[in-house]
Image (tube, rainbow, N blue to C red):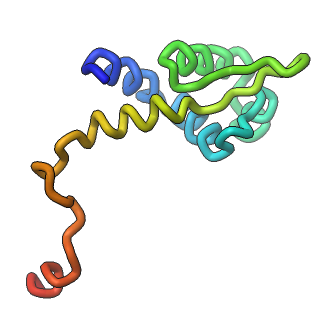
């Protein structure tokens, strides 16, 4: 992932409503959610939700599938994983960021 791609994704998540929509869809995983489900759970007006979903899809954070008359939104797990890898690349200088129990006990 390049800086430009990470910035696009982070900007899309930088709005409270979009972050809430994304987190709710992530919780459902590959089952996904319809816009109607999201309106019901989040109380966001349809037009506002449509705008936020479009932004998340444009940032490639969500994939959308049409099933009959319904649209199903699912997280793009590959992009989320790529972003996580990008953000944590060489984290803590390549060493484990999680302190072991003996070093915690000795620091007390």
Compared to residue 3, the image places residue 20 above or below, namely below
- Camera-nearest residue between 58 and 90: 90
The residue at the point 54 percent across, 21 percent down is: 56
Q: Residue at x 59, y 20 (%)?
A: 52
Horizontally, is 49 left or right of 19 in the view? right
Image label count = 0
Q: Is residue 77 above or below residue 66?
A: below
Image x and y of residue 77, in percent: 53, 35
Return the residue found at the far right: 68
Left-right relation of 92 to 89:
left
From the image, which quarter does the N terminus lie in? top left
Left or right for 1, reference 95: right
Q: In the rendered image, which quarter is residue 65 located in?
A: top right
Question: Where's residue 13, x and y in %?
Answer: 45, 29
- Horizontally, residue 20 falls left or right of residue 10, namely right
User: Which residue shows up at 89% across the image and 17% down it?
Assistant: 69
- Image quarter of residue 57: top right
Q: Is residue 75 above or below residue 51?
A: below
Residue 104 % position (x, y):
17, 80
Q: Residue 96: percent from the left, percent from the top? A: 20, 60
User: Which residue appears at 65% of the width and 42% of the height?
Assistant: 29
User: In the rendered view of the protein, which quadrant contains the C terminus?
Assistant: bottom left
């Amino acid at each position: 992932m390049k800086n430009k791609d990470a910035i696009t994704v982070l900007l899309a998540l930088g709005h409270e409503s979009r972050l809430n929509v994304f987190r709710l869809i992530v919780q459902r995983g590959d089952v996904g959610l319809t816009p109607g489900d999201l309106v019901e759970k989040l109380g966001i007006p349809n037009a506002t939700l449509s705008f936020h979903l479009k932004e998340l899809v444009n940032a490639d954070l969500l994939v959308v599938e049409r099933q009959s008359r319904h649209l199903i939104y699912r997280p793009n797990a590959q992009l989320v994983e790529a972003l996580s890898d990008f953000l944590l690349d060489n984290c803590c200088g390549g060493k484990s960021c999680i302190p072991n129990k003996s070093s915690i006990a000795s620091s007390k």
